[in-house]
Image (cartoon, helix red, strand yellow):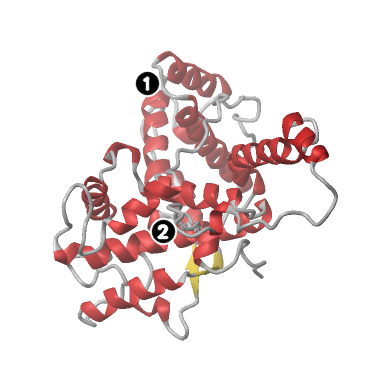
Amino acid sequence: MRAPGVRDDRHEEAFLEMLAAERGASPNTLKAYTADLADFGSYAHAAGEAVAAASAATLAGYMASLARTGLSARTAARRLSCLRQFHRFLAREGLRPDDPTARLEAPRAGRSLPKFLSEAEVAALLRATGSAGGPGGVLPERRQKVAAAALEILYATGLRISEMLNLGRDALAGDGQVLLVRGKGGRERIVPLSAEARSAASELVASRPASSRFLFAGRDPARPLTRQGFDLILRETALVAGLDPGRLSPHVLRHSFASHMLAHGADLRSLQRLLGHADIATTQIYTHVLAERLQRLVEAHHPLARPSAGAATAEQPAGPPPSQGPPPSQSQGSSRSPAPSERQGSSQPPELC
């Protein structure tokens, strides 16, 4: 029998194995939960309790200590989520009779608006991957094809960086018009691929030896490009494009994809499927774009929004309305970059099965 306060990792290891095997938890999730359990373990052991046998009072004291140390509400909420799942796992397996986290309330984190680039900034970023470069110079030739394929795919599909880096070399097999993506929790989804993204990816494949099974191979062809390696490429491309690298990350490109799709008429349900969100509540962080679009619609079409325009219309003589040119988004010489939906040839993403 173990003495109180002596660490026993068996239950924690069983919990993490369950997450990986039954829920398809990613390596990053497992790493974060391992750190969360270790942090709570230090607190519990100082109180003379094992992690698996911790009391509700010890758990409440731990959460209070996180608030006192100034830990962000989002991180504290994730730690509580980890501890909830762990103790529910123990109760389900008959390893303890209760769930000591049942009465604990999660810290409330204010929901911040997602950061995204303008369409012009995305266009500048994509141009910077070419041989002409941008205001900050030209990318090294060996980086151009990797940067072009990666940025075209990220902006055309809204993939998570982990999903993109794990794409196989054969991801473009067949006509290459769609990608089969394995996302969080092992869930699979199909996303359409733009012609520009297909072309850039095909050029990348043609320029690389066939010894790697990954579309974005690392220095070791047996492994994919690392997240840190891609961050360096993204930073370099941002500098060439004349953008602040501090504003740019793979997730900012994912937010840009989603925000621009909504701004051009996509609906939340289709966007949820494209992004691979299990719950549409997650997709609703982009509703600020819908609110802005509704405001523009009211300002453009409500009869009281533009009284001067209405008065001018009333004074026009009867007869056929004057001819109108194409909308600004289609006019010749427009500097606006195409949104992902337009680059794929449709104003809305298709309904996917």
**Who is closer to the viewer here, 244 or 111?**
244
Mark 2 and mark 1 lie on one chain; the one further toward the N terminus is 1
Q: Quadrant of the N terminus?
A: top left
Q: Rounded to the nearest whole Å, what is the CA distance between mark 2 and mark 1?
A: 46 Å
Q: Secondary structure at mark 1?
A: helix
Question: Looking at this view, is 127 or 266 the one in front?
Answer: 127
Tag nearer the camera, 2 or 1: 2
Above or below, 341 against 13 in this view is below
Q: Residue 34 appears in which quarter of the rendering?
A: top left
- SS assignment at label 2: helix
> Can see residue 347?
yes
From the viewer's perspective, is residue 155 above or below residue 117? Answer: below
Circles 2 and 1, Cβ within 8 Å, touching? The answer is no
| Residue shown at the point (28%, 38%) measured from the top left | 244
> How far from the left and from the top, in percent, is residue 72?
44, 24
Residue 268 locus on image (x, y percent) = 66, 51
Residue at x-position 31% and y-position 72%: 214
In the rendered structure, which amino acid carries the disc numbered 1? Ala
Q: What's the residue at 54%, 20% (across, down)?
A: 60
Name the one closer to the observer, 159 or 300: 300
Quick check: 42 left or right of 211? right
The x and y percentages for residue 300 are 70, 40
Q: For mark 2, what is the residue? A: 154
Furthest-right residue in view? 318
Task: Residue type at mark 2: give it.
Answer: Leu
- Residue at the top extreme, as displayed: 68
Question: Within 10 angstroms of label 1, few (less than 14), some, or many (20 or more) residues?
Answer: few
Q: Could you tell whether 306 is left or right of 153 in the image?
A: right
Residue that label 1 marks: 46
- The residue nearer to you, when weighing 263 against 251, is 263
Q: Give the residue at x 36% y 27%.
A: 42
Quadrant in the picture for the C terminus: bottom right
